[in-house]
Structure formats: C-alpha cells, structure tokens
Amino acid sequence: MIIIPARLKSSRFEHKVLADILGLPMFVKTAKQVESLDDVVIATDSQKVIDVAKEHNLKAVLTSEKHNSGTDRIDEACKVLDLDENEVVINVQADEPFIEKEVVSSVIERVKLSKKANDKTMIVSAYKKIDSELADDPNHVKVVLDSNKNAIYFSRAKVPYNRDHQRTEYFGHLGIYGFTVKSLSEFCSLDFAPIEDIEKLEQLRAIYHGKQIAMVEVESSSFGIDTEADLKRAIEIFKN
C-alpha cells in the first residue's frame, strides 16, 4: 500500500499540498503518479484535504494534528486501516507530484526482497547521483553510503566533505520510504534522536539507534517542492 501523508500546514509554504499542479491539487497529482502501482491512501490532519480527496476518488483517512512527522502519520493510518504487520507500506511525500512510478516501484521491490531474506533492514529509501552544484543546496538532502548501499548518514550539508578537491560523487536522497507495517511501528517507537532535530531529518533516528536503511539507486528528474520558488521551477520544467 502507498500512503501519502498530507499535512495541511507548512512552515515554508502554507497549504502547499493543495497548490495547483497543472490543474490538480499537489497531493492529488502525486497520488495519480503512483496509483497504478498499488492501493493509495491519503493520511491527513485536515477535513478539507479529505473532501478534496473524495472529489478525486481517492481514499483518505483523518489522523491527528499532533504528529511531528509524516512517518508518524502513516503509522497511525496503518492502525486505522488495520493493516497486517507484514504488509508493505510505502511513504510517498505529498510534495513529489512528478515522482516517477519506476522510482517507487524500485523501493517496493527492495522492501519485498528484504522481507523475503529476513534481513535487518528497517527502512528502504532511494537516492540518485547529483552534481556538485546541487549538492551545495541544503534543501536537497545528501546521503553517504557504505559498501552494501546502506545509509551511513544523511545531511543537508555537502557530504562527504571534499578536503583535497578530488573527483567526488554526491548522492541526493529522495524522500520515499518503504517499510513493512511491523518495521514502521518499530521505527515510530524509537526514542527521539538529537541529530534528527539538528538536521531536521527524521530518518537519522534509525541510524542513531543502529538500525539499517537500505538504499536503492534510481534515475529521477523529480524533486520535492518545499517553497513557492520550487513550485514555479517544477511547473516550468514539467509542464510539457
């Protein structure tokens, strides 16, 4: 199941999940991008979002206004929907209206592989190669990997730091997360980690507690829309 957390309030871009994306509200456009892959549910704190979802024939559940993260929101949605603990759940951010379905499919398949192998993976996510200029942007999160393509660290800073100005690869993180219902519940039960507050990146909670985040490499032109400037740029890029 694909669950899209759609919190109405946003500190940098008020009501951005309802912003118009080529004739559709942002969260609806995101849902339409991936609905051919699996059942899609919107998890929101707003009756207005519920009503808009219904207008577009999308299933939606109302969740608490008190959640600090989209992951906590989809965990509640799983409980409301009474999903089996072995169900694969994919968290696709509402502000990814141009996400390619191939990207999401890659995460789904990697979660299934981990489940079949019964390995130690708690979360599956995705990354793409980015250039040095994009790596400079703190709005584009970077990830550093180990030899098994598990995440060592995520940062808004330009990592790894290129001290000797060598030829360096930078990996940009895509905000898509794959879990089983069981691993999602386990993640949400972990104690809050200081580093996640410093970087404002909740996935660091898993790393702080020694949990494994498996990463899959993808090709993607999509990017999350955090500001109105991002929205204008995305529409200009993707309108054709």
Image (spheres, grey):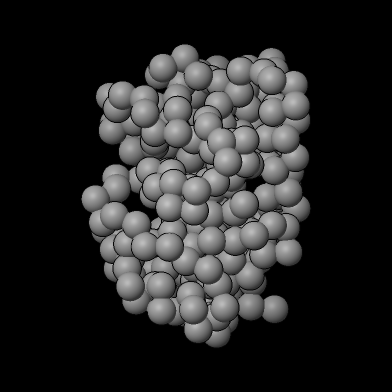
**Image coords of residue 56 (percent x, y):** 55, 80
**Image coords of residue 197 (percent x, y):** 28, 33
Q: Residue 149 sits in which quadrant?
A: top right
Work out whether 92 lies above or below 178: below
**Image coords of residue 76 (percent x, y):** 39, 47
Residue 112 appears in view: yes
- Which residue: 44% across, 46% down? 79
Work out whether 85 lies above or below 232: above
User: Front-most of 226 and 165?
Assistant: 226
Q: How many marks?
A: 0
**Image coords of residue 37 (percent x, y):** 72, 58
User: Front-most of 2 and 93?
Assistant: 2
The C terminus lies in quadrant: bottom right
- Which residue: 29% across, 31% down? 198
Q: Is residue 133 left or right of residue 157?
A: right
- Which residue: 52% across, 30% down? 183
User: Front-most of 22 and 88?
Assistant: 88
User: Front-most of 8 and 131?
Assistant: 8
Q: Is residue 236 left or right of residue 191?
A: right
Work out whether 33 lies above or below 72: below
- Which residue: 44% across, 59% down? 43
Residue 74 appears in view: no
Q: Residue 22 sits in which quadrant?
A: bottom right
